[in-house]
Amino acid sequence: AEKWQSALGFMEAMRNDDVVPDVIAYNASISACEKSERWQVALDLAGMMQRDNVVPDVITYSSVITACARAKQWQHALDVFTVMQGGNLVPDVVAYSAAISACQEGARWQHALDLLKIMRKNDVGSHA
C-alpha cells in the first residue's frame, strides 16, 4: 500500500480504538497525501479535523495547500490559504511558498506577485 493509504489505515485504527486523532496524526496523514498527490483526500482530512474538534495549525494548512498546488488545483490551494488567514493563523514562508506555487500552476502571476508583496510587507521569512 502507498504511504497515504497506510496513514488512513492508522487513522481508522485509532477511531476503532475510540481514540480521536490529534493534530499530529492528522498532519502526518495529510503530509502523506500531499506526497502522493492525493489532494482531495488531504482536503477531506482537513474537513474531518473540524468534526473531531481538532484545531489545524500552520503545518496542516501548508500541507493541504501544497497538495492542491502539486495537483494543479490552484483555486482550492488559494481557498485553503484564505481560510488559513481567516483562522487567526499567520502564514509562514512555507505556506506562502505553497500558495505562490499554486498561482504558478494556475498562471495567476498577478496574484503570485501580490502574495510576494504581502509576504515582504509582513516580513515573512526574513528571519529564517
Image (spheres, rainbow, N blue to C red):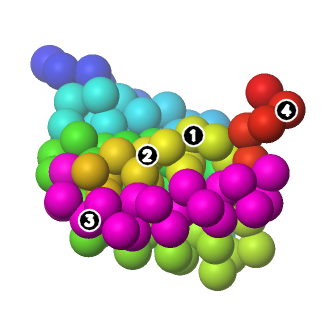
Q: Quadrant of the N terminus?
A: top left
Q: Residue beneath label 2, please?
A: 98
Q: Which residues are magenta?
A: 105-123
The dot on residue 127 is 4
Could you tell me how far apart the alpha carbons at marks 2 and 1 are, in whole angstroms? Answer: 6 Å
Could you tell me how far apart the alpha carbons at marks 1 and 4 are, in whole angstroms? Answer: 13 Å
Q: Residue beneath label 1, please?
A: 94
Q: Residues within 10 Å of mark 2 (few under 14, many from 20)?
A: many
Q: Residues within 10 Å of mark 4 (few under 14, many from 20)?
A: few
Q: Is residue 119 magenta?
A: yes
Could you tell me how far apart the alpha carbons at marks 3 and 1 are, in whole angstroms? Answer: 19 Å
Q: Is residue 27 left or right of residue 44?
A: right
Q: Residues within 10 Å of mark 1 (few under 14, many from 20)?
A: some
Residue 84 horizontal/vertical position (percent): 59, 68
Closer mark to the observer between disc 1 and disc 4: 4
Q: Residue at x 32, y 37 (%)?
A: 34
Q: Amino acid at mark 1?
A: Val
Q: Nearer the viewer, residue 3 or 125?
A: 125
Could you tell me how far apart the alpha carbons at marks 4 and 2 are, in whole angstroms? Answer: 18 Å
